Amino acid sequence: MASSADGRKAKLLEHIKKLIEQQRRPIDDIIRENALQYLPAKSLLRFKSVSKQWRRWISSPFFIHTQSNSFRSLSGLFINNNNNGSSTSFASLDPSSYGVPDASLEFLPDDVHVCASSNGLLLCRGKIRPEIHNPLYYVCNPATRDWSFLPSPDCDHGGHADSVPVLSFQPSILGFDADFEVVVAFRIGDFDGIYGFEVFSSRTGRWRPSTAVCDGGRLVPFSGVISGSVFLWRTSLPSVVACYDADADKCWLSEMPPGFEGSAWQIGEVMGRVCCVCIIGWTVTVYAMDGRGGWEVMRFFDVRDYGLEGMPRGLPFNGGDEVLIWIDGWIFACGVVSEGTVRSVSRMESYNADCVPYVNSLVPVKGVCDQ
């Protein structure tokens, strides 16, 4: 009994000693090692000028890996400003904290259309190359201007209106390689609403044609969502979501929440869950997929309760705990987990669903082709 009590006393004294040592450490060391990883890329790049020590720390592969795992907040929208994709802009949800040095993405060697994003990485599509009958795909981090392009696909993806790409990057604490996956759903021949799939993996550096075929109506661009290995898209059919499992190589159709047929709706991801935003009149209902093919209500509100008179329209969302809506020239972020918040975050003069949500991360881009 005495030895057991002595052991507990020794552990307590050791713990007290460590606390005292922590109190004696400079405050900037404590901030650098315990808080910086939760900040967005724009703030961190600015903080490099604090000191040489901070610059080395923020630039280290270990810190970059930690930050890409720790910071997941929705930071803004990349907006394609015209049909040919030659101009992009960025609507920040907090301009003082979230931002990129070149919102037009002119550091890429091509005029691009932003197609998708995932946890800090963007997937962009360049012009169609006549010699390969396909566009070049680029994966980039707009915060650091790091980029790589993908090898030419084996299948014919067609033009902008014929294919719907989605990017999946899932940060892992145990994996330092920032591996990603791209799934492109492309129209088969002249059959409208019938799609095949091709999958690119940065682990192998190759494309893999799928044997699955989706006959669920036209897939809606910029509506792609990821849940594990499953990729989901809105379709032109009322209340239907198309699903493709890249690991199992199979596809199926799923229904959106009942009672909202014909309403305006968006699908996205909130806190790791696939969510659906349904809008009727001034009311907004946020559902989350329950894992059994059904849906549960996460939030219901009327925008007039927040002093807003305009009709809301849904915007793409992905990351954090907020969904996005547009009302009378403003983007509003609506808390789902932190229920009760509806805040204006950025101007968008006219409604434009041709946009992609983005997380302001330092994640590196894994090279898959020589630049």
Image (cartoon, rainbow, N blue to C red):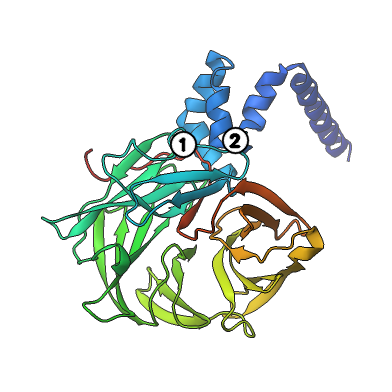
Q: Residue at x 79, y 58 (%)?
A: 307
- Residue on which the image places disc 2: 37
Amino acid type of the residue that numbered disc 1 sits on in the rendered structure = Ala
- Residue on which the image places disc 1: 143
Q: Please, which residue is most extreme toward the top here?
A: 52
Query: Of residues 92 and 297, which is closer to you in this image?
Result: 92
SS for dot 2:
helix
Q: Establish if 342 lies above or below 362.
A: below
Q: Quadrant of the N terminus?
A: top right
Q: Residue at x 56, y 20 (%)?
A: 54
Give left or right: position of 249 versus 310. Answer: left
Q: Residues within 10 Å of mark 2 (few under 14, many from 20)?
A: many
| Residue 140 x, y percent position in the rendering | 37, 43
Give left or right: position of 327 versus 1. Answer: left
SS for dot 1:
loop
Chain-order first, disc 2 or disc 1: 2
Q: Quadrant of the C terminus?
A: top left
Q: Residues within 10 Å of mark 1 (few under 14, many from 20)?
A: many
Q: Is residue 228 visible?
A: no
Amino acid type of the residue that numbered disc 2 sits on in the rendered structure = Gln
Instruction: Indicate the quadrant where residue 301 lies.
Output: bottom right
Q: Is residue 103 visible?
A: yes
Q: CA distance from mark 2 to mark 1?
A: 15 Å
The number of callouts visible is: 2
| Residue 80 x, y percent position in the rendering | 42, 52
Q: Residue at x 48, y 63 (%)?
A: 226
- Mark 2 near mark 1, Cβ–Cβ under 8 Å? no
Query: Of residues 236 and 183, which is closer to you in this image?
Result: 236
Q: Residue at x 63, y 28 (%)?
A: 33
Q: Establish if 96 lies above or below 163.
A: above
